[in-house]
Image (cartoon, rainbow, N blue to C red):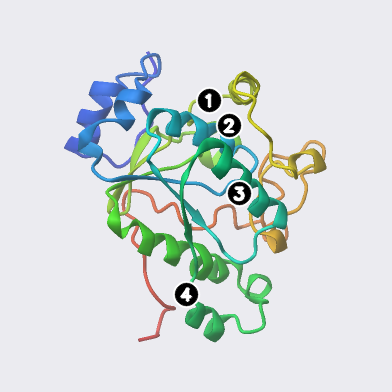
Amino acid sequence: MMNWPAGGSDPLLEALQSDHLPDLGHVDMAGLLGDPRLGRRALVSSFGAESAALLHFVTQLFPDMPVLFIDTGRHFAETLSYRDLLAERLGLNLVNILPDPATLAGEDADGRLHARDPNMCCTLRKTFPLADALEGFDTWISGRKRYQGATRAALPVIERDGSHLKVNPLALWTEADLAAYFAAHDLPRHPLVDRGYASIGCAPCTRPVRNGEALRAGRWADNPDKTECGIHLGPDGRFVRGRPGRG
């Protein structure tokens, strides 16, 4: 029998896993997502290449689930159109989240912060806005999957993420599972997928994936040490405002 990967745990996590995810062969995802111990829940979506599957899967069970979209101001126009299409087709309870304009004016006046300091750009445009939005929730739902790359290969289905619980309902899905789900429910693909974009983030930092590359190779391709935007904190993570040395 395969066990869940090692990582931060506590009595609540252990109880939820025992009740709904005792091992990799017994996953009661609907039961987990509906468990009142999760508290106030929100789904966070980038409306990227594979987002429609998670959005459909969760909102078929919980139609009123808030869907948080971080509008960084740097998304592809196609992503915004796709967001609007899915919001209408699936009847989403969509909540658009924006970065603080005063902070952007001070830190990214020329709009080139992504080139100078991509980590700080993600922090200002994604991490801080999401942190503020999640203050009203106890649990958030993510679309990450194990097959997306080495850094996600041991991704748990439920985990601690800073002060929140986080559920990854599609963590154990394969590419074939995802393709079958899109086909079974006639879900539209992101328009950039056909142009080679396997993983889709902000326009300045995303390119198509070349033959033989990993799915997320087109994200921050000019910065090989950067693989995540920083919104996933892990069990000991905390949101920290400002740069070191600033008040």
N-term-proximal mark, 1 vs 3: 3
* Residue 169 visible, this angle: no
Tell me the CA gap for discs 4 and 2: 34 Å
Q: Earlier in the sequence, mark 2 or mark 1?
A: 2
Q: Nearer the viewer, mark 4 or mark 3?
A: 3
* Dot 1 amino acid type: Trp
In this rendered view, identify the residue nearer to me: 40 or 168.
40
3D distance between C-alphas at marks 1 and 4? 35 Å
Q: What's under tag 4, amino acid-wise? A: Asp
Label 3 packing within 10 angstroms: few (<14), some (14-19), many (20+): some
Question: Which residue is found at the position 30% from the left and 59% from the top?
Answer: 135
Residue at mark 4: 100
- Quick one: quadrant of the C terminus? bottom left
**In this picture, is 246 found above or below 65?**
below
Residue contact between numbered discs 1 and 4, judged by CB atoms under 8 Å = no
Label 4 to label 3: alpha-carbon separation? 22 Å
Name the residue rendered at 35%, 24% in the picture. 30
Q: Which residue is mark 3?
A: 84
Residue found at x 29% / y 51%:
137
Identify the residue position indicated by label 2 in the image.
147
Discs 2, 1 touching: Cβ within 8 Å = yes
